[in-house]
Image (cartoon, rainbow, N blue to C red):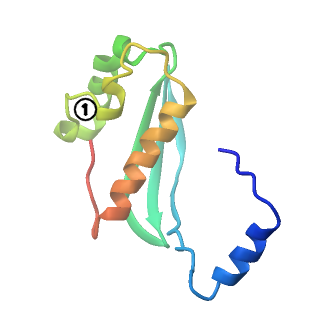
Amino acid sequence: IPLVADGLFDLLMLKMTPFYMSKKQTKIESKGPRYELGDFCIKLGSVTMNQTFKGVLVEVEYRPCVVPGYCWELLREFLQGFLGSCVQSVIPQYLQNRINDIYQPMDTIHQYLEHFSMYRKSTGILQFN
């Protein structure tokens, strides 16, 4: 969203500095290896918030398919193969409205942001499906 302001805005911001401090964002990141197994790409990420371990994110991509609804059962079965019964059969909330749309990189970003916000709200280690 573009913002247009005149020179007085800078003066206003200077005057507000003693009264207003911007909130420091906590740094949260997911780092880890990437594996390829046939048509699948698996990314494992250790989630840390301010250098404190919070959990592990597992991202799986089935490369031949770009519509989640066409390959959801295959992805779920693949995940259950190495994560076991903790993988839920319910489609993630974010994808439910987009299940028959072409998957875009922005969809991955939204899902990471969703998980990161859950990690920020948690006090311990969480398990998400």
Where residue 52 sits, quadrant-wise, is bottom left
What residue is at 39 percent from the left and 46 percent from the top? 114
Observer-nearest of 89 and 123: 123
User: Is 18 positioned to the left or the right of 120 in the image?
Assistant: right
What residue is at 45 percent from the left and 67 percent from the top? 49
Task: Identify residue type, mark 1.
Answer: Gln
Furthest residue to the bottom?
Answer: 18
What residue is at 70 percent from the left and 46 percent from the top? 2
Observer-nearest of 13 and 46: 13
Density class for disc 1 (Cα within 10 Å; few <14, some 14-19, many ≥20) is: some
- Residue 16 point in image, percent of width and height: 63, 81
Q: Is residue 110 above or below residue 37?
A: below
- Residue 70 point in image, percent of width and height: 36, 11
Which residue carries the number 1 mark?
80
Q: What is the secondary structure assignment of the residue under circle 1?
A: helix
User: Is 65 positioned to the left or the right of 74 in the image?
Assistant: right
Q: How many marks?
A: 1
User: Is 9 positioned to the left or the right of 59 in the image?
Assistant: right
- Residue 12 point in image, percent of width and height: 70, 75
Could you tell me which quadrant the N terminus lies in?
A: top right
What residue is at 43 percent from the left and 32 percent from the top? 60
Furthest residue to the left?
Answer: 85
- Residue 61 point in image, percent of width and height: 47, 27
Q: Is residue 91 above or below residue 119?
A: above
Furthest residue to the right?
Answer: 7
Could you tell me which quadrant the C terminus lies in?
A: top left
User: Is 87 positioned to the left or the right of 56 in the image?
Assistant: left
